[in-house]
Image: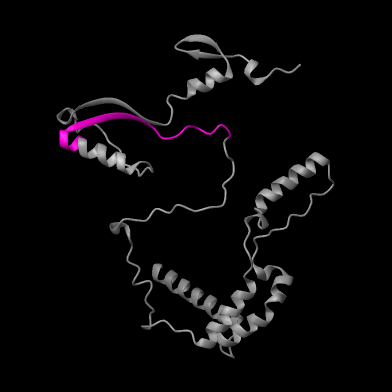
Amino acid sequence: MPLLDREIIRRRQVGGETVDMSPDEIDKLRRITLPGFYLFFNGSLPLLFYQISMKYFEEVLGSTLMYRTLYEVCMKQKKMMICRYTQKANEEISSKFRYAGFHLVYLPYAEDKRDLSEQMTHPDGEWPKASKEQIEAARGFVKKLTASYFPEKFCNPVLQKHYKVIEALALDYAEMPEVKDQIQPYFVHDVFRKRVEKELDSYRTATLSDDYNPEEKKKKETKTKRTDDSSRSSKIL
């Protein structure tokens, strides 16, 4: 008959002594305090030594009225309080996945902001402005590719390949099942590309000139790069 988890006794070294402890006792030993504030000391403000290191405060949701009242009383009576603060208790079941939701982005300070005005300025003075026809063509192209987003529809291809390898080894498959990459761009799949052929042609006609040749432009860029590299090498020599 298997033992229950609470019936298993574990041995731990505590203060140089070997102690037999149950899982519940070990769990309680790990928890130093319950979440919240515990008042240690309430004394006169001149007893506060400024050399004590203090971390930058974090905003914690709670009773603003109680905090404000407590702060005003301490300032009026020249008092200070030393507390122990436990932010939260550890979860019993740790989460291994990130759920969909908000992403916290820290905004930079004013002195950390970069001046990108030079990079954002067009070499010839002004950036070209799109015409109404070009905007409508781009809108139709984007609208054709837009669909409802559900995180469950797009799986991580690396994890899917890992799972397929485990499945093939466990079930002794001769070949590993094919893994479909669901996060590839539209032009990789023929079905998606054919879906937007009409809108893509309209957008290309509205934005590019009739004599535009991407292959010729690519050759010119390669030739220019080689010329620059050769001139740079001759200067070094």
Left or right of 139, for residue 79: left
Residue 76 among magenta residues: yes
Residue 204 on image: x %, y %:
60, 83
Q: Residue at x 42, y 31 (%)?
A: 35
Quadrant housing residue 185: bottom right
Q: Is residue 3 above or below residue 113?
A: above
Q: Is residue 121 above or below residue 30?
A: below
Q: Residue at x 17, y 31 (%)?
A: 45
Residue 223 on image: x %, y %:
53, 78
Quadrant housing residue 63: top left
Q: Is residue 221 above or below residue 60?
A: below
For the N terminus, the quadrant is top right
Residue 141 among magenta residues: no
**Residue 219 in view here:** no
Magenta stretch bounds: 74-93
Residue 103 on image: x %, y %:
48, 53
Q: How is the image coloured?
A: one colour
The single residue placed furthest to the bottom in the displayed view is: 210
Residue 168 on image: x %, y %:
79, 44
Q: Residue at x 14, y 30 (%)?
A: 46
User: 84 or 19: which is nearer to us?
Assistant: 84
Quadrant housing residue 180: bottom right
Q: Residue at x 47, y 25 (%)?
A: 31
How many numbered marks have been drawn onto this rendered protein structure?
0
**Residue 13 in view here:** yes
For the C terminus, the quadrant is bottom left
User: 206 or 234: which is nearer to us?
Assistant: 206
The single residue placed furthest to the top in the displayed view is: 17
Left or right of 43, for residue 34: right
Q: Is residue 225 above or below residue 166?
A: below
User: 21 or 233: which is nearer to us?
Assistant: 21
